[in-house]
Image: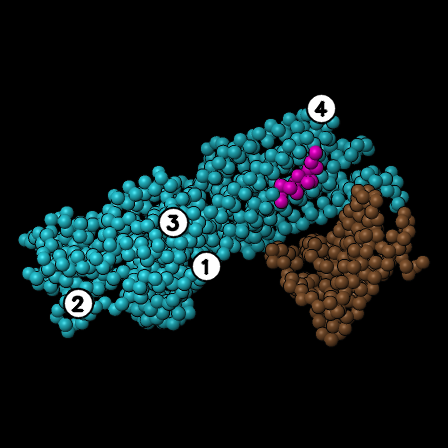
Amino acid sequence: MIELPLIFVSGILGSSHCLGMCGPLALALGSNGQLMSRNLVRQLVYSLGRIFTYGFAGAAAGFFGLWLQHFSPLVNVQAGLAIACGLLLVVLGLVTAGVIPWRPTAVGHFPCAAAGWLKTLLTAPSLPQVFLAGVFTGFIPCGLVYAFVALAASTGNVFNGALTMIAFGLGTVPLMVLAGCGGSLLGIAARTRILRIAAWCVVIAGTVSIARGVGFLELTGAGTAACPFCR
Amino acid sequence: MTPAPASRPSCSYCHLPLPRSWRKTGDDLCDEPVYCCVGCRIAAAVTSAEGEEGAARWMIARLGFGLFFTMNVMVFSMALWSRDLYGQDTHALTDSLSDLFRYLALLFAVPVLFLLGGPIFSSAWQALRRGNWTTDVLIVAGVVAAYVYSAVSVISGEGHVYFEVGCMVLVLVTVGRWLEASGKLRTNNALDSLEQLLPDTLRRVTGVEHRIVPRESIRRGDRVRILAGERFAIDGHIVAGQGDVDEQLLSGESLPIGKGPGDTVYSGTLNLDGDLTVRVTAAAGEETVSRFVQLVKEAREQQSGYQNLADRITRWFVPATWLVALTTVWYHTQYSGIEAGILAGLSVVLIACPCALGLATPMAVWAALGRAATAQVLFRSGTVLERLAEIRALRFDKTGTLTTGFAVVKHFEHDENTEPQMVLARAAGLATASNHPLSQAIVRNVADVTRPVQPRDAIHVAGRGVSAGVDAASDRIYLGSVPWMQESLQAVGDRLTAYLDMALKDGEPVACIGWGGQVRGVFVFHEQLRPHARTAIARCRQMGIDVSVLTGDHRSRADKIAAALDVDVCASQSPKDKVKALGEAQRRIGPTAMVGDGINDAPALAASDVGIAMGCGADLSRDAAGVCLLSDDLLRLPWTILLARKTVRVIRQNLCWAFAYNTIGIGLAACGKLNPILAALAMAISSLLVVTNSMRLAQYPQPANDAVCETSFDSFVPPPKPDVIYTSDDPAPFVEVVRS
């Protein structure tokens, strides 16, 4: 799984995209804990919960990919999923970079049905409940997560799927913890710049995935992933 | 407010009526909160967040950990499946690792049973104690059986494990029911938003002191000060101050109404610009909005026809489910082994959950009643709503319904032998004894220029008029229609005969007053048609409803109305004739609704299939009508009928869906063709579909007010200023009739 580091980096840079929605949650988490160290622990536990859900989603997606392969052995599912996910990532990245004009309507609008009880968990003093808040946060609809879930599905394996998503989840940790602890450590200008870089990084990840899918198409029957960068 | 007549107990969270129990419930259970399903139990625990945050947190954490452990079980199961089903062994998943995964699945699955199965079980247990057999007990039993079988497999080291089935079923049942409960609560939104409009605090005035107090502490007789821009939270009379009041919430009337000392103000209306001091006549909980909300709530608790149907089916459904489930378990155990039996039985009880069936009617009716309430339409029960959807004919009363309730005295003519002042004084006196719109016109136009006599032993004859004595010496006085004069043997003199003929020929409403065998005076009125009357009637007709007007007016007047509204008008109808005409329409056409003002036409409203009262305003006590339109906007009438039809359509869709889903689902499950996880998913989706489909009614569009005001009937609109101008310095407050 040579592309795990790449997914990790995509997670790091892509997570600035997520700060819009999940940043406030991380802040709500910290508002109770006055001590920096205690807050840090809460943030890490919260992220652990998120990574757990991502890992679960990755495993489920991997199994789904496997099931698809069995279901329709004639179609190269792995290639199809890799290309689909790549396209999704490229579009997402281009939208974030501002190349494709699209006014998001739902982004930044927190799903209100969940707000009540998620807040109850976020502000809870005990760590297990903070962990649960993280578990639930992992389910919040997010285009970036879906793209990586599709990538996980393309692995066609429960473990590789879970690993893909865990790598992505780990990548999102630094910025989320930073946002939760520091609040506004990054200025608006810096954030905009990072957002740009992140967007292009997502585009690159998408392109790699597409290339991988095309590679699969060529080497029909090849069992291992053929990353174009590591050949 | 009298409490609703012995209604069925309802769920403490969503207020839906509980299923009818099989035995008389003991009083010992009354003090604990009762929930209709596990969803409501969980939602109630979670939403008590404001009150008991600890308990809410515990319940959320419980669900959360249930979900967390289930996710673990799923991952292990998927890993096992990868090997077992697809022979994938890329990660050197040796047999020992596979055994480890099986034990881990067992380890993570056990807490789920207690975390998520617990609430389902206690809910089922409570229902059982109340005498309700539910399928929840069977669901828990099926899940436990799947667990036991899997645990035995794990320990013995052979056979399949079905922990993921047990866990996923518990998660899906719990989450599905919870979402369903939240959806159910949303049907209350319309009513809650009405009540929430009322401010929580009021400014009580005692002497010169003003104190802000909670709404509940205000009593009848208190004085409160309402500033500009504030909403009234009570009913009362203005004692000081003047201002415009927006009564749109109650009457649908968008134009503000000027009010001053002595005028009545109602809760829910908005003080636009006055600084008003109000003496409270109805305190919080008894004022108009609260009574309105209370009436809608009572209407919801009435069982409707479709509800009875669903209830009857449910009563047989649950025992039948038990039977089918047990047979399924026995059959599959016999032929395919115990695991197939357990799984098929679990699928049957999951898919056979009668939730959707039970929700099909009340959800739709509640959403529709709430929607109607926000459009100022009050249904007395869900049955009325269902019946309104079925009506084929519509009969209108004229006065106060198609015409505004405010007639104007246009002319007055008196007998040459009688003092006009005396006639007016007696007419005004008798008119105060009646609330007929024409009497009220006399009171309004005449009472302030003369001193009305005090009527004694007034007798009100519906559709005719009123009679009363003035003093012991004189004869009884009769005030009312021309036939009323003939029946009470009051002869019309030459001068009045000519005048009366002329007025009748013009098609204007008239009223006579007479005593001592002689008609002494004749009033000619001007009546204005309500705006949109023609459009409303046309729309009703477009909907395939037979429309006609029943009026006590004479023929010439009826013809004029018929021409103005383009509708059949039956003239000279006494209240008895109206009832007869309704019976005729019911026989000839079908279910018939009667539209009236609810005051002067109560017998006809009661005799019809659905009585509809127009322009009730704050007067919610018009019991003869099954439907009260608070607003006097006639366009609400076709809108209300359309809403009723749509509601019945939604009910039928819901019932059809629930039946079809249950029948097909049980068939598949009994044959062992349905995975329990899919069955649980289908169950949750089915209930949610019913709730969502019903919630469409809550978004039913507002009645369109785009119709142009009809102008074809020029003598009706706009109202001319009355020819009779009364001034205080004019001792003879009328002019001789001048007609060209």
Q: Which chain is cyan?
A: B
> Closer to the camera, B626 or B335?
B626
Label 1 neighbour load within 10 Å: few <14, some 14-19, many 20+: few
Q: Chain of mark 4?
A: B
Q: Mark 2 and mark 3: span between their CA atoms? A: 44 Å
Residue B513: x and y in percent read 14, 56
Q: Counting residues from the N terminus, which is met first, the one under dot 4 or under dot 2?
A: 4
Single out the residue that lies furthest toward the right. Answer: A231
The residue under the point 53% across, 48% down is B694
Residue on which disc 2 sits:
B738
Residue on which disc 1 sits:
B704
Residue on which disc 4 sits:
B334
Q: Nearer the viewer, mark 4 or mark 1?
A: 1
Q: Mark 1 and mark 3: span between their CA atoms? A: 20 Å
Looking at the rendered structure, whether the residues under marks 4 and 2 are on a common chain is answered as yes
Q: Chain of mark 1?
A: B
Task: Specify whether residue B681 is painted magenta.
Answer: yes
Residue type at tag 2: Val
Q: Mark 4 and mark 1: span between their CA atoms? A: 64 Å
Residue on which disc 3 sits:
B627
Query: In screen coordinates, is B732 left or right of A164?
Result: left
| Helix, strand or loop at mark 3 | strand
Q: Mark 2 and mark 1: span between their CA atoms? A: 43 Å
